[in-house]
Amino acid sequence: MDNIPTTETKRLFTGRKQLKQDIEHVTQEMYKRNFELAEANKTLSLLRAIDSIVLESHDELGILCQNIASAIAKYTSYPLVAILVNPPHKDYLEMLGLAGASGIEDMFKSCKVKEDDHETWLVSPEQKAILDISSVDSRLIAEVLCLSEDQVNDLKNESGIKTILLLKLLSRHRLVGVLAIGLNQEKIEVHDKQEQLIERLSETVGIALDSKLLFEENQQVLRQLQKTNEKLKTLDETKDEFISMASHQLRTPLTSVKGYLSMVLEGDAGEIGEMQRKLLDQAFVSSQRMVYLIADLLNVSRLRTGKFVLEAVPSNLAEVVEGEIGQLKETAAGRGLKLTYDKPADFPELYLDETKIRQVIMNFTDNAIYYTPSGGHIVVKLEDKGESIEFTVTDDGMGVPKVQQPNLFTKFYRADNARKARPDGTGLGLFMAKKVIVVQGGNLLFTSQEGKGSTFGFAFPKSKLQPPPTPEPTATSS
């Protein structure tokens, strides 16, 4: 009787058996979860590795693809990882990345595939294709995989690969390549998680390739722009040399023309009538404008080559202004304008580049005459402000549109209304005027209101227009 199991003993035995089953189940679940976590960690590590390769790579596209393929093969142990890329403006897929089992590179190196020959899958909406190597005809695999039939036969017989998973590499809805993954499993054994991993890889690799292709396209455009820029620089230098040479050649005969006109006006060639004087005055002013235009062209060329220099001499600015305004009074009167200038008495002698300042005065006044309609007024002022001097030309002409005022002193720039009023302008006068004023330590004065008129001028601190101190004689030893 003692050997007969009691009810309590049976209950304990059953409970122990259930506990053992529960422990086995929990252990299996733990192993399963640990495996899934390990796979997830491997996936994340691989994706991080690809990101790192892309971010740190400054190599060409082929090296980048090879590094990505090698990383995928290392982390996953896939026997075949191939990246075929669609280069910009090309009609074929080119094998740029290949890694996996030993000898796999020899099977597929130098693979280059015409898209037109393999349109079946590449242009279809299907993004993924799974090929069973053993059951599918070699010609079909060659067509879909973009390989030759001999390469597929080598793949079947020597690599041990049973299934190939193909995914299009897309970015911004554009095909940038194909990712081919070879597996040692039959097609039926390929599970969802493997497919999900490979799909995630294709997304990451597609974006990486697209970014690299865009970068290389940008680099190519940059190189083309640099070449074009060098050509433009050469052309610009040639143009400057030509302008400089032509200006030098023109200056001598123009100086002679101006000199002879001046002699005739002064009566050196005999008496002239009033009408003749007016015509000769206009010719003299026009020749002076040409001289100043040529000087502007030469100065622009000198600015570019660093040869722009000032030749400061003692000058009576009041008389300089009077001389320039005197030449333009006839022109202003002929256009129905009133040009006034009250010469200040006892104006201080200043040390400046008189020739260049004459050009500035002529330019400001000449512009006022051209851009003021008949019946208008132009007032020229030269004032001694104590610590500084100020010169202004004020008109009640067309003015400058507000939106175009910031560009007015830029080389070759002209306001729209000025272009219409005077199509033959060069856009150099105001540019050079600003340079001459600023280089000598002065400030440009400019205000304008469209339809109301403008004021152009300059101001100089007197301290900037003083002669340089005379160096003390060096003591000599006896």
Image: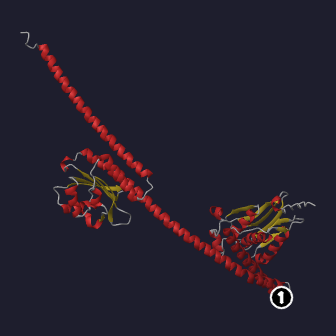
Q: Secondary structure at mark 1?
A: loop
Q: Position of residue 187 (x, y in %)?
A: 19, 50
Q: Position of residue 227 (x, y in %)?
A: 52, 68
Q: Residues within 10 Å of mark 1 (few under 14, many from 20)?
A: few
Residue positioned 22% across, 63% down in the render: 150
- Extreme residue toward the bottom, this view: 270
Residue 401 seen in the current view: no
Q: Nearer the viewer, residue 28 or 296?
A: 28
- The x and y percentages for residue 370 are 71, 73
Examine the rendered structure and indicate whether residue 366 appears above or below residue 402.
below
| Quadrant (top left, top right, bottom left, bottom right) of the N terminus | top left
Q: Quadrant of residue 367?
A: bottom right
Q: Is residue 214 left or right of residue 191?
A: right
| Count of numbered circles on the image | 1
Name which residue lies at 64% across and 74% down.
Answer: 240
* Placement of 73 over or under 457, stated as above or below: above
Q: Amino acid at mark 1?
A: Gly
Q: Mark 1 highlights which residue?
A: 273
The residue depicted at 80 percent of the width and 76 percent of the height is: 327
Q: Is residue 435 left or right of residue 461?
A: left
Asked if one can make out residue 328 in the rendered structure from this viewpoint, the answer is yes
* Residue at the outermost left position: 1
Residue 384 spot, x, y in % from top left = 85, 61
